[in-house]
Image: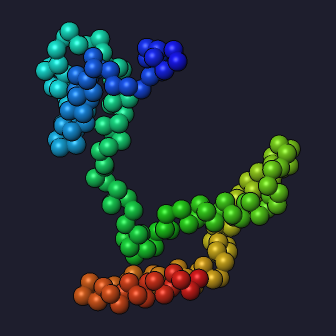
């Protein structure tokens, strides 16, 4: 019966009334960070000015709060970096496709899931040799086979569609693009 009547331990999750001002301060900082464009340090500093010094001992470290505010804010450049249409029109490879292609090809050349260090080192040396041969061919104006035929055709289809894009026929463009993507 004493177990039910004992005092709370340090592991108790009951609200502690003396930490309420600290929780309110954190919530105020989060709310202010969400509605203003101020820097993180300015937001925290201006909110802390209203906090009583007698309650300062209840505050935890500020670093987790700073990280949370920085993660909460979005960057403005995301749309610019990932504009696939502009990359296709400029004949620049679409993001990750060339990297994923190389990674898959290298994984096929390695042939096993968990190679030993010696085998992996040998495969990396062979890959380096292949890259040097390809670079020499490019410098000598030879055409090298960079992609499988099906992916070259897909890129041609997508490039043709992107070059003939008409904003007034957006629904037709999206249907055609979706058909090309699902066919392959």
Which of the image's four quarters has the C terminus? Answer: bottom right
Q: What color scheme is it?
A: rainbow
- Against 170, residue 135 (above or below) is above
Residue situated furthest left in the rendering: 50
Give how far across and how far down residue 156 sits, in percent.
51, 84
Q: Residue at x 33, y 31 (%)?
A: 66
Quadrant in which residue 51 is drawn: top left
Residue situated furthest top in the rendering: 54
Q: Nearer the viewer, residue 116 or 89?
A: 116
Give how far across and how far down residue 121 sits, in percent.
81, 46
- Against 27, residue 126 (above or below) is below
- Against 32, residue 145 (above or below) is below
Quadrant in which residue 138 is drawn: bottom right
Quadrant in which residue 183 is drawn: bottom right
Give how far across and how far down residue 84 sits, in percent.
41, 69
Report the label total.
Answer: 0
Q: Residue at x 75, y 56 (%)?
A: 127
Res 83 seen here: yes
Q: Residue at x 46, y 83 (%)?
A: 178
Left or right placement of residue 110 versus residue 134 in this view = right
Left or right placement of residue 5 versus residue 25 in this view = right
Residue situated furthest front in the rendering: 1
Q: Residue at x 22, y 26 (%)?
A: 25
Q: Nearer the viewer, residue 134 or 97?
A: 97
Res 39 seen here: no
Left or right placement of residue 71 versus residue 56 in this view = right
């Amino acid at each position: 019966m004493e177990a039910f009547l004992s005092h709370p331990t340090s592991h108790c999750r009951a609200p502690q009334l003396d930490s309420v001002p600290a929780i309110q301060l954190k919530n105020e900082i989060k709310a202010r960070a969400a509605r203003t464009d101020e820097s993180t340090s300015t937001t925290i500093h201006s909110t802390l000015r209203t906090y009583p010094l007698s309650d300062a001992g209840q505050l935890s470290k500020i670093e987790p709060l700073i990280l949370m505010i920085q993660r909460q804010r979005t960057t403005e450049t995301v749309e610019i970096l990932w504009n696939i249409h502009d990359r296709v029109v400029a004949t620049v490879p679409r993001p990750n496709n060339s990297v994923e292609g190389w990674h898959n090809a290298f994984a096929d050349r390695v042939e096993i899931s968990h190679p030993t260090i010696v085998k992996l080192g040998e495969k990396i040396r062979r890959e380096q040799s292949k890259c040097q041969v390809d670079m020499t061919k490019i410098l000598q104006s030879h055409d090298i086979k960079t992609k499988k035929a099906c992916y070259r055709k897909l890129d041609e289809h997508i490039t043709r569609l992107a070059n003939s894009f008409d904003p007034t026929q957006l629904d037709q463009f999206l249907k055609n693009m979706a058909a090309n993507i699902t066919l392959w």
